[in-house]
Image (spheres, helix red, strand yellow):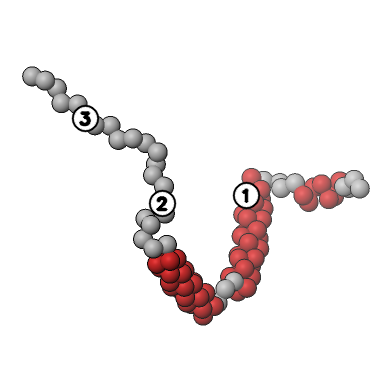
C-alpha cells in the first residue's frame, strides 16, 4: 500500500535535530526491548541452588569414575598403565670429537 503525502511528510524529519531525536528514540526503544528479553532469559535461567546441586552431582560422578578407574587398574594386575607410546624414537645426541 502506498503512503499518502501526509504520511510521507510525517515520516521524514524536517530538520537534522528531528532526525537525531528520531534515531535516539528508536535506539532507546530497541535497548529497552533487548533489556526486557535479557531480563526474561535471566529470570528463566538456572537458579543458584540448582547450580549447586549440579556441582554436587558432578563431584559425585568424578569420585565414582576415579573409583572405577582404580578398580580397573587393580584387575589389570599391574600390566602397565595401558597407555601407548607416541611411536617416536628418541634421538641420542652425538658428541663431537675435538
Q: Is residue 56 above or below residue 36?
A: below
Q: What residue sits right under mark 2 in the picture?
A: 83
State the residue at coordinates (62%, 68%).
41
Q: Is residue 13 left or right of residue 68?
A: right
Q: Secondary structure at mark 2?
A: loop
Quick one: SS at disc 1?
Answer: helix
Give coordinates of residue 71: x percent, y percent.
Answer: 43, 69
Of the image marks 1 and 3, the number of the one nearer the N terminus: 1
Foreground mark, 1 or 3?
3
Left or right for 14, reference 82: right
Q: Is residue 32 visible?
A: no
CA separation, marks 1 and 3? Answer: 74 Å
Between discs 3 and 2, the one toward the N terminus: 2
Of labels 1 and 2, the one closer to you: 2
Reply above or below: 88 against 33: above
Front one among 36 and 29:
36
The reply to whether residue 38 is visible in this rendering is: yes
Mark identifier at residue 93: 3
Q: Give x and y (percent) for residue 86.
A: 39, 41
What residue is shown with label 1? 20
Mark 1, other Cα within 10 Å: few <14 / some 14–19 / many ≥20? few
Q: What's the residue at 11%, 20% (across, down)?
A: 97
> Which of the 4 image quadrants contains residue 78?
bottom left
* x then y, percent, for residue 76: 42, 62
Extreme residue toward the right, this view: 1
8 to the left or right of 44: right
Crowd band around label 2 with a 10 angstrom C-alpha radius: few (<14), some (14–19), many (20+)? few
Between the C-alphas of marks 3 and 2, the distance is: 27 Å
Of callouts 1 and 2, the N-terminal one: 1
Quadrant housing residue 29: bottom right
Please identify the quadrant where the C terminus is shown: top left
58 or 4, which is in the foreground? 58
Amino acid at each position: 500500500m502506498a503512503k499518502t503525502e501526509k504520511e510521507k511528510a510525517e515520516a521524514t524529519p524536517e530538520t537534522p535535530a528531528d532526525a537525531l531525536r528520531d534515531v535516539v528514540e528508536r535506539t532507546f526503544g530497541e535497548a529497552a526491548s533487548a533489556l526486557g528479553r535479557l531480563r526474561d532469559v535471566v529470570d528463566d535461567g538456572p537458579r543458584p541452588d540448582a547450580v549447586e546441586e549440579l556441582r554436587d552431582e558432578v563431584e559425585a560422578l568424578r569420585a565414582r569414575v576415579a573409583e572405577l578407574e582404580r578398580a580397573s587398574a587393580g584387575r589389570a594386575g599391574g600390566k602397565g598403565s595401558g597407555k601407548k607410546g607416541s611411536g617416536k624414537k628418541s634421538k641420542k645426541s652425538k658428541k663431537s670429537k675435538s
